[in-house]
Amino acid sequence: MIIRPCDVETTGLEASDEVIEIGFTDLRNVSDIWGLSTVSKQTFIRPARPIPPESSGIHHITDDDVKDAPSWADGWRMLVETPNDDGKIIFAAHAAYYERQYLDHLIQADWICTWKCSLRQWPELASHKLQALRYALNLPTDPERASPPHRAAPDSYVCGLVLLELLEHQTVETLLLWSSEPAVFTKFDFGQFDGKPLSAADDGYLDWLANKDHKMGEDWRWNARREIERRLIVKRKQALDLLLPAIAGAATVTDLENWYHGSAEYLAKHGIIIGSTDYQSLISACAARKKVLIEGGQPQFGGTQ
C-alpha cells in the first residue's frame, strides 16, 4: 500500500478553473515504519485558457511554462501510476476537498485530509495552514525540496512530512475516519469573534451559523450545531443537578404531582424531552420518592382544634 500526498496548482480558486500543475510524494510502510520517498514527482498541465497574472503571482507558473505540457485529460494519469505494482493507493492532501473537486470523478480512492487531521490532533495551534504546521511542528524539512511554496511537488513533500508526524500519533484508519467527517474547529477565524473560542459566540450568532443562509460552508454549519448541542448538554446537567435533589426532598405526593404537571415548560427550555434518558431519570426519581412517601406515611401539616 502507498499513501500518496499530492497537490494541484490551478488557474484560480473557482471550481471552473483549470489544473496547471500536479505533484506527489509517496509514503511507504516498511517493517511497520512509514517513510517518505526521497524524490517527488511533478508535471505541468496545459490549460485551455491563459493563466491569469494574479494566479501566476501566487505560484509563479506562466503560460510559457505549460505550453508544451500534456492536457489534463492525459496528465492526471500520473497520479495513479505505481512503478512496482505496489497495490492500493490512499491519497492525501492538505485541505483535500480542493484536490478532490478535480479528481473524485476520475479516481475512486480513499483520502486523508492532513488539514482536518491536524485540527483534531493539534487543536491548540494558532494556524493549521500547511506552511505554518511545518514550523509549528518543527518538521525535519529539506529546504530545497520544500521550496518554493505554492508549487505542487514542494507542497506535496511538506504534506507528506505532516502526515508522517500524524502517523506517529494515529493509525491510518483513524486518519481516514477523521478525514471523512467535518473539520472540527475550536475557534473562529472570521467575523466579530475572530480568534475567540466557539463558546464566546452568543446563541443568536450560533443559530445564524447553524441554520441560516451564509457562505461559510457546511463545516462551519456542523460546528455551530455541535456547539449548540454542547450548550444544551450543559443546561440539561445544570437542570438535573437542581431537580434531582429537589425531587428526593419532596415532602408529599401532592408536591410531586404538582411539580410533574407544571414542569413541561421548564424541561423543554433545558432540552429535557419525553423519552430521553434525562427525562426518564427524573420520572424514576419521582416514582422512587412517591413510593417512599406512601410506604412511610406522609408528614401531616397543621393541626386540629
Image (cartoon, rainbow, N blue to C red):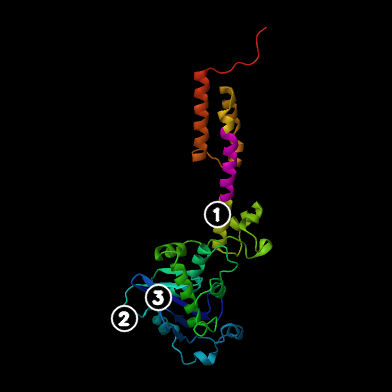
Q: Which residue is mark 2?
A: 84
State if disc 1 and disc 3 touch (CB < 8 Å).
Answer: no
Q: Is residue 174 above or below residue 287?
A: below
Q: Is residue 168 above or below residue 51?
A: above
Where does the magenta region start and end?
230-244
Q: Which residue is mark 3?
A: 35
Left or right: 77 as drawn, with respect to 300:
left
Q: CA distance from mark 2 to mark 1?
A: 45 Å
Q: Is residue 127 magenta?
A: no
Q: Which quadrant of the figure contains the C terminus? A: top right
Task: Label 1: state its secondary structure.
Answer: helix
Three-letter amino acid code at disc 1? Arg
State if disc 1 and disc 2 touch (CB < 8 Å).
Answer: no
> As rendered, which of 45 and 125 lies closer to the eye?
125
Q: CA distance from mark 3 to mark 2?
A: 16 Å
- x and y, in percent, of residue 299 in the image: 58, 18
